[in-house]
Each structure stands twice: as structure tokens, then as C-alpha cells.
Image: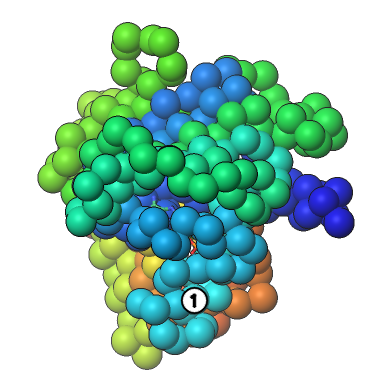
């Protein structure tokens, strides 16, 4: 039973950066304006995330790591959007099967914070009163301590840290209203820091550097018949970085869409010399029922309705923008 749970959990989480992505989304769902990430050994020893969001009611703490228990059904009554947004209550449950999970939380009406640990989906004891401000802190320690195959599949701490930084950076660009920090535990220097109430472009500048930000053009494209809207920033054709950097959010979730990526790379290939690669940040919004509900929400690759038509439309808009930029 537990072994099966562990294997399933390992498929949901896979590596520290995946777990962190889920936890960042939880902070955003809880309306945090400040999210602080602290890691040790690329998140393998410690992956800690602190937010100043709503916190969790003490009486709900027993359910937090229960599989398929989500508090978000109350807010998202439409079942299709629950499935597609990834609100299925699997993330923390999975993590609790493959790591030591400790949670400290305080709502605005609590007189103190409450601290509780979880193992295999259950609280290991009753919540204990604790110090802490409003919001939630989750500490994940010794990820995959009980799944040797997963542990062996991890890269070096440096590489895992880089994947974590990539996730934090991308969410910071997409959520400029929220302040993000990333640091290594015990280090005085901060890896990433974006202020709350920032702008997308300022955060791109902070995270990817001024030379990237300088070359960007605003991008927008919309089709009422296909029922989607896309906006963001794209490189103009003078641009060059070491590899293509493509930040894609669909309905505010960080995803991959190979078809769209390839379509965009094709366009740039005809404008850029081989050694030049573009930077793009796109935020797509579409009706939740248009997203494929059969793809597991924690998997990054997405599919959606009228995908070919939507991809073509965006491809044309990118090309039009590049032609308009007149090089
Ligand atoms: P889901 O996000 O799909 O509901 P998760 O496993 O990611 O499932 O989280 C389980 C539940 O724990 C959430 O529904 C929410 O009630 C609570 N929760 C998790 N993280 C936070 C947080 N940072 N702030 C407030 N509540 C949280
Ligand atoms: Mg979640």
C-alpha cells in the first residue's frame, strides 16, 4: 500500500523543482503577496516555502495531505476548471509520502500559528501552538529518503538548484504583483529577489538581465472565435542568447506546449542567424473547458482544443510583430 503510494507520489513530484512549482501555486491560490523560498542541497535536503497568504484553518489541517482533498472546490465550482487547473489535492499528499513535511500556518483570526508534521498523508500528532506571522510555511526535508530509485535519478545539487531557480524566476515574471525571493539556507546572499508590486518587464530585467529586457517587444494576440487571448514579451530579431528561453503560462500555470514552441522556433529560425536564440514570455488564457482534462495537471505538457489553429494564429502574430520590427 505505502510502496504503491510512494511510487505514485514519485510520479507526481519527480524532483524538487516540481514540488516547488506546486507549492508556489498553492501560495498564489492563498493570495500571497510575498513568497520566500529557502533551499539546501538543491532542495534535496530542504525545500522550504513561506508565504503571507490566508493561512489554513486549524480544523482543516488534518485534510491538507489527504489524497484528493482540496479546499478549492468551494471556490471553483466548475468541475472542469478544478480538473484542469490542477486542483485535485495531490501535491502535498504526494510529497508527504516521499519526504518529511512540516507545516506552520496562521490565519488572520488565529492568536498564534499552528505547527504540524505529516507522514504518508496523515498528521503525525496534533497541531502545536507556535510562533509565526499570518501565512503558511512548508518545509520539505529529505525528499525521496524512502525512494532510492528517485533519489538516484536526481541530478547534482547544483543542477537541481538551477531548476528551482528557473521555476522561481518564471513565476516571478508571471506574477509581478508578488514579491519572490530564493536563497540557499545559511547563505547571506540572495539568489533571486523581486519586489512586490513590480512589473513584468522589471522582473525580466532582474532575472534574465538588462540585455534581455532591452530587446523585448510587447506582444498581444487574441481570437474571439477560437476563444483565446495571448500576451507577453518577445525578442526582436536582433536578439541573441545561448539558448531559446520560452516562458509559457496557460491560465496562469507554467506549462510546456511542444507544438507552440516548435512553431515559434520555426519563425525565429528564418529571421535569426543559427547562433541566435529568442527569449519569449507568453501568457495564454482560454476557457478552462478547452484545456485537455485527461493530461495530468502536474505534468507540464498540455494539449488544448483547436490547438493547431491557435498555434498557427500565435505563430502568425509573432511573425507579423517581427516583420513590423523592421530589421
Ligand atoms: P490543491 O492545490 O489541488 O487543492 P494541494 O495538495 O496542492 O492540493 O494542497 C492541498 C490543500 O492544502 C489546498 O487545497 C489548500 O487548502 C491547502 N494549502 C496548501 N498550501 C497552502 C498555502 N500555501 N496556503 C494556504 N493553504 C494551502
Ligand atoms: Mg495545489
Q: In the displayed structure, does residue 325 sit left or right of residue 93?
A: left
User: Relative to 48, is 33 on the left or the right?
Assistant: left
Q: Residue at x 51, y 83 (%)?
A: 80
Residue 30 is situated, as x and y percent measured from the top left of the image, at 32, 57
Q: Is residue 248 above or below residue 114?
A: below
Residue 250: x and y in percent read 43, 64
Q: Position of residue 285 (x, y in %)?
A: 36, 71
Q: Quadrant of the N terminus?
A: bottom right
Horizontal arrangement in the rendering, residue 189 relative to residue 250 (left or right): left
Image quarter of residue 42: top right
Q: Is residue 236 above or below residue 153?
A: below
Extreme residue toward the left, this view: 197
Left or right position of 81 against 194: right
Q: Quadrant of the C terminus?
A: top left
Q: Which residue reaches farthest bottom?
A: 225
Tag 1, which secondary structure? helix
Residue 9 visible here: yes
**Which residue is pictured at 30% across the width and 70% down the height?**
221
Q: Decide which of 294, 22 is in the foreground and name it.
A: 22
What residue appears at the point 78 percent right and 48 percent down from the top-left corner? 6
Q: Which picture quadrant has residue 171?
A: top left
Corner quadrant of residue 134: top left
Question: What is the x, y in percent for residue 23?
Answer: 47, 47
Which residue carries the number 1 mark? 82
- Residue 18 shows in this picture: no
Q: How many marks?
A: 1
Amino acid at each position: 500500500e505505502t510502496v504503491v503510494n510512494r511510487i505514485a507520489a514519485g510520479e507526481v513530484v519527480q524532483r524538487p523543482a516540481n514540488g516547488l512549482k506546486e507549492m508556489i501555486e498553492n501560495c498564489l491560490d492563498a493570495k500571497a503577496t510575498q513568497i520566500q523560498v529557502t533551499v539546501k542541497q538543491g532542495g534535496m535536503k530542504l525545500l522550504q516555502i513561506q508565504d503571507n497568504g490566508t493561512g489554513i484553518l486549524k480544523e482543516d489541517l488534518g485534510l491538507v495531505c489527504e489524497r484528493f482533498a482540496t479546499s478549492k472546490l468551494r471556490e471553483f465550482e466548475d468541475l472542469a476548471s478544478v480538473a484542469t487547473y490542477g486542483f485535485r489535492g495531490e501535491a502535498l499528499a504526494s510529497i508527504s509520502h516521499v519526504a518529511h513535511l512540516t507545516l506552520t500556518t496562521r490565519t488572520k483570526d488565529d492568536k498564534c500559528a499552528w505547527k504540524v508534521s505529516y507522514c504518508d498523508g496523515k498528521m503525525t500528532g496534533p497541531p502545536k501552538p507556535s510562533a509565526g506571522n499570518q501565512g503558511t510555511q512548508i518545509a520539505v526535508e529529505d525528499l525521496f529518503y524512502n525512494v532510492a530509485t528517485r533519489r538516484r535519478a536526481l541530478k547534482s545539487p547544483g543542477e537541481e538548484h538551477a531548476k528551482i531557480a528557473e521555476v522561481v524566476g518564471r513565476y516571478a515574471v508571471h506574477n509581478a504583483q508578488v514579491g519572490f525571493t530564493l536563497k540557499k539556507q545559511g547563505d547571506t546572499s540572495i539568489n533571486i529577489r523581486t519586489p512586490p508590486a513590480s512589473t513584468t518587464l522589471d522582473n525580466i530585467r532582474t532575472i534574465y538581465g538588462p540585455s534581455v529586457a532591452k530587446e523585448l517587444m510587447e506582444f498581444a494576440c487574441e481570437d474571439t472565435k477560437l476563444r483565446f487571448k495571448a500576451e507577453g514579451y518577445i525578442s526582436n530579431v536582433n536578439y541573441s542568447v545561448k539558448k531559446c528561453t520560452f516562458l509559457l503560462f496557460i491560465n496562469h500555470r507554467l506549462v510546456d506546449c511542444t507544438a507552440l514552441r516548435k512553431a515559434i522556433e520555426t519563425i525565429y529560425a528564418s529571421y535569426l542567424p543559427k547562433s541566435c536564440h529568442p527569449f519569449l514570455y507568453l501568457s495564454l488564457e482560454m476557457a478552462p473547458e478547452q484545456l485537455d482534462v485527461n493530461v495530468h495537471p502536474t505534468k507540464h505538457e498540455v494539449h488544448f482544443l483547436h490547438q493547431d489553429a491557435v498555434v498557427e494564429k500565435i505563430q502568425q502574430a509573432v511573425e507579423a510583430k517581427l516583420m513590423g520590427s523592421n530589421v
